[in-house]
Image (spheres, rainbow, N blue to C red):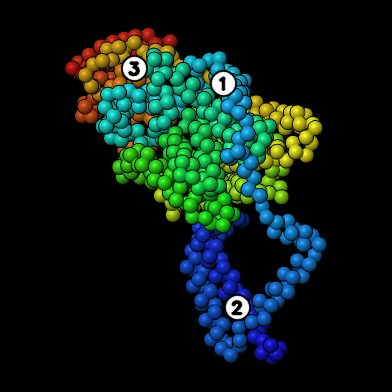
Amino acid sequence: MARDARPPRWARVCDLLSILLVALAGIVAVSGGFRAHTGGWRVAITSPYRLLLWAVALAAIRHIAAPRAPIHRDLPRRISAAWNALASQPATRGFLELAQRPLPFGEARLFADRDGPRARLAEWAAVVAGCSLLVAAFTWPQVRRMDSVPDMGDPLFSIWRIAWINHQLARDPSALFDTNIFYPERLTLTYSDAVLLPSLAAAPLLWAGVHQVVVYNVLFLSAFVLSGITMYLLVRALTGRRDAAVVSATVFMLHPYRYEHYSHLELQMTMWMPLALWTLHRTMAKARLRDGLATGLAFAAQTLSSLYYGVYFAVYAAVVGAALWMARRVPLPPLAALAAGAALATALIAPIASQYLASKPTRGERDVGTVTDFSARPGDYLRASIRSRLYSRWALDEPQERHLFPHVAPAALALVGAWPPMSVASTAYTAAWVLTVDGSLGMNGMTFPWLRNHVPGYRLIRVPARFSILGGMSLAILCGYGAARLLARWPHRRNVVLGAMLAPIMVEALPAIALERVPREPPAIYARLAGQPPAILAEFPTPEQVGITWWDTHYLYFSTFHWQRLLNGNSGFWPASYIEFLHRTRYFPNSGDLEYLRERGVQYIAWHGAFVDPRQYRRTAERLDARPDLELVAVAPWGGSESRLYRFR
């Protein structure tokens, strides 16, 4: 092209800007856009259509101003020349050769198992025993005191959930989700995670008469152990090494996230995700129907154990599965097997999901402000858990849910595993780790806003920071790759290398666990209600505001001994009727409060001295005793004070 035929410089700049705007529009369409706050300025690019409009407008202005100036056809040649010049450099050439090298899949033990039945039995017996002993050692205060919990909030709520599901399934399964709290609301079990599968697993222990607090702790601790076992299964298959699988299982069982959420039963239920990934790899490798069905079954089990993780894991598994599928040159048979698994998972999850959909008009969607508060910031990955024995001096009580420090040793070992050369699988898990870290940033990242706008279920998510557990799972898998690489590097010093990896992981993971003993029996006043016809009970004192859970979680625990209906309640959502109850009875026991309770159909009132100042307890008890419309039914000592039960005449 002759020099005078080239467009002027300003026209070439306009052409380049138009191309960049179109490319940026494509990125925004895929990622959901960008938001940033800096120096008091707010920058937001969220609309691909606006960027396309600017590109068209810029191209139109350029064409109107210089209609005879040709488009810069020399641009592709210049870009190609610059790329060739860069590629000719030795460092770049070496990187390109490494990048273009075919990646192995790195799935060493998915199918071929050369060990005999006795060897396999011995191996898995050792794995179960080792995981159990390790968890017992790191949670010894809990193992020694199975009648205790870390606090009287969420653990008591989980004890109630487990007890309710087993109580109701034996009596009226059709009303399983219409619990005895927040009367007269319906579908109140959907106000939080139903933990249906763990509750069903607890049924034999409860029916055998084991105390519900002990059953809760058995479920809680077994989640650690089972997560380690399934992680061992996955990483042994990926790396072909038992020792590397031991490292991954240890990292996953002792991940600091578990101690950050030591009060949350459902957030310990991570055992099904490694199993689903193992079956996913098998499906992609051989496209067998049974592996596809097993993948769907494991995914359904994960969703029915923890709804949060089911929603998050669907995206995670899609990323890993897509990487494996494309690396195998997009074969169709695995898709058919996975479709069968998806159909099975849908059939298992749909009856439960329908209950959550039915209560959605009552619960609504999570507001953006709340979601933003529970969205991680990059600095939160340097914020240690308050229960870390080694790092607690740098931990802060706030913000909640955002102490995400993964510890130094696992992060360093995962970096070794993610270092080139890589296999297809390790590349997929590295990409999935990046996705989960960005997902945990919630409204501060790119992944979660897009998911919230395009994927069903994400508008109901309150805490994006919990995405980080999948980052912890990726970290554990990459630690297995790193361990395999180091152990292969020094095969004659295997035990020394293995010990050098496990020792710092365990030292960093040492927790500081404080426990509170749960009363084995409730106040004796409830003996008057147990086995009686259905009645409506209001418990006092009540919290001063929504979100203070300690009293109400006690009342839920007490209700497992009588199962009468409560105006009180506790969950991840508080209905308007409960908020009205708190507001209308804040001056209890004024006459207006009692008239309001009559209007709500209340038949019994319980007043507990253990939760208030002794003088307040006595004054309120005297006023209740003096009411002609109330009858004192029972008085019993409890918690260093008294509890009293009244009935409306």
Residue 634 or residue 13, whichever sits in front: 13
Give SS at disc 3: loop
Q: Quadrant of residue 381?
A: top right
> Please, what is the three-letter code of the amino acid marked with disc 3?
Phe
- The residue shown at (28%, 20%) is 605
Can residue 85 be seen? yes
Labels 2 and 1 touching (C-beta < 8 A): no
Q: Whole-percent x and y of residue 219?
A: 48, 24
Q: Nearer the viewer's eye, disc 3 or disc 1?
A: 3
Q: State the mark number for residue 561.
A: 3
Q: Earlier in the sequence, mark 3 or mark 2?
A: 2
Determine the CA span between mark 3 and mark 1.
27 Å
Residue bearing the label numbered 1: 514
On-image quarter of the C terminus = top left
Three-letter amino acid code of the residue under disc 2:
Asp
Q: Return the residue at label 2.
A: 15
In the rendered image of this protein, does residue 173 appear above or below residue 560?
Answer: below
